[in-house]
Image: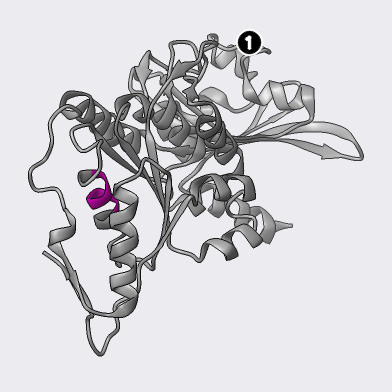
């Protein structure tokens, strides 16, 4: 028992995620160092106190810890932005799970990941995109800048050129480093949408809660700290959006993407109205698409919607490079 207690203390002290544990009455049992840093509080201010006394802005309906005790259902990766006690705006992605033994709820644990810096970075990207969506970057790639001689490469380039002449969705498969985004930008720049925005997002770089807000936008009150802001689909209206590493996107978010493809509407997080968008979607995957479908990494119905045009980019070989980008 002494060993287990010491091990637990070490884990709580050095783990990067914030951990907050309460009993079924709402009294805090565990509040680790990372959570202290996140919320600007000392453990002595929180331990053995009811969380509603420590956080008066919360109540039994808005507290996720209280919520999972009531429902006995976990809340996975809930995105929120709020101001801590020191007045700092922080962004977290929280997973909150009830502690159940013999069907009786004993309490709840919340694990918080700090995404403040990531959100700040993407806020800058979104703000920059809002200012520059009407401006075409003259350095963008086109097919003349992609040179190669292998049969598989020539076939891929020919397929890409045909894709540029249509408005169909495109699914690009290629190993990391084979130039999937170069092909996607070239397809856009050779298409009828070339004078409209081209917006790219890496689906593997962000948790679902944050990615959903970036893609579809938010309205004030949609979640803690939300503001009225258009998403990338609205900003890319009339143009093209590149969803890089689609196979890293959760199936739940893929279902919402499928709705956009089927209906041509998006709905901001927390909103009740649909917003029409005209966006061409190009998606990429670094894994073989059929395998992704078989392994449930990509929804089968979404795969068929995206793969109107399939483009496979051959990999570089170590012995001889068969193509290059100018």
Q: Dot 1, how many residues are within 10 Å of its Cα: few (below 14), some (14-19), or many (20+)?
A: some
Residue at horizontal 50 percent and vertical 15 percent from the top: 274
In the depicted structure, whether residue 317 falls above or below residue 141: below
Q: Which residues are magenta?
A: 184-188
Q: Where is residue 256 drawn, in percent x and y?
A: 56, 33
| Residue 172 pos. (x, y %) | 40, 57
325 relative to 65, above or below = below
Q: Nearer the viewer, residue 210 or 35?
A: 210
Q: Residue furthest left?
A: 138
Position of 282 compared to 294: left or right? left
In the displayed orientation, state which residue is furthest to the right. 102
Q: Where is residue 285 drawn, in percent x and y?
A: 44, 58
Q: Is residue 279 left or right of residue 56?
A: left
Q: Nearer the viewer, residue 254 or 28?
A: 254
Q: Is residue 126 magenta?
A: no
Q: Which residue is mark 1?
A: 59
Q: Quadrant of the N terminus?
A: bottom right
| Display coloring | one colour
Tell me which corner region of the image, top left, top right, bottom left or bottom right, holds residue 225: top left
Quarter of the figure with the C terminus: bottom left
**Image quarter of residue 217:** top left
Identified at 28% across, 38% down, the residue is 199
Magenta segment, principal secondary structure?
A: helix
Left or right side of 22 for 188: left
Is any atom of residue 110 visible in this view? yes
Q: Position of residue 179 (x, y in %)?
A: 27, 62
């Amino acid at each position: 028992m002494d060993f287990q207690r010491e091990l637990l203390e070490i884990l709580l002290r050095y783990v990067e995620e914030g951990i907050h544990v309460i009993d079924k009455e709402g009294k805090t049992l565990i509040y680790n160092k990372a959570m202290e840093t996140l919320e600007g509080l000392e453990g002595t201010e929180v331990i053995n106190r009811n969380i509603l006394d420590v956080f008066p802005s919360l109540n039994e309906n808005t507290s996720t810890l209280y919520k999972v005790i009531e429902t006995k259902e976990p809340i996975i990766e809930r995105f929120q932005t709020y101001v801590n006690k020191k007045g700092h705006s922080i962004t977290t992605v929280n997973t909150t799970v009830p502690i159940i033994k013999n069907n009786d709820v004993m309490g709840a644990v919340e694990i918080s990941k700090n995404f403040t810096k990531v959100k700040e970075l993407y806020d800058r990207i979104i703000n920059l995109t809002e200012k520059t969506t009407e401006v075409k970057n003259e350095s963008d790639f086109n097919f003349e800048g992609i040179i190669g001689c292998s049969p598989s490469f020539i076939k891929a380039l020919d397929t890409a050129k045909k894709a540029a002449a249509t408005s169909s969705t495109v699914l690009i498969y290629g190993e990391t480093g084979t130039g999937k985004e170069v092909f996607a930008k070239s397809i856009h720049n050779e298409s009828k949408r070339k004078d409209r925005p081209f917006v790219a997002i890496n689906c593997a770089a962000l948790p679902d809660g944050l990615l959903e807000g970036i893609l579809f936008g938010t309205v004030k009150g949609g979640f803690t700290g939300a503001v009225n802001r258009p998403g990338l689909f609205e900003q890319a209206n009339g143009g093209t959006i590149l969803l890089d590493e689609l196979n890293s996107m959760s199936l739940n978010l893929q279902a919402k993407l499928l709705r956009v493809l089927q209906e041509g509407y998006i709905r901001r997080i927390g909103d009740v109205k649909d917003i029409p968008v005209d966006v061409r979607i190009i998606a990429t995957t670094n894994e073989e698409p059929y395998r992704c479908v078989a392994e449930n990494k990509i929804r089968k119905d979404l795969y068929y919607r995206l793969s109107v045009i399939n483009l496979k980019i051959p990999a570089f070989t170590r012995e001889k490079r068969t193509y290059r980008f100018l």
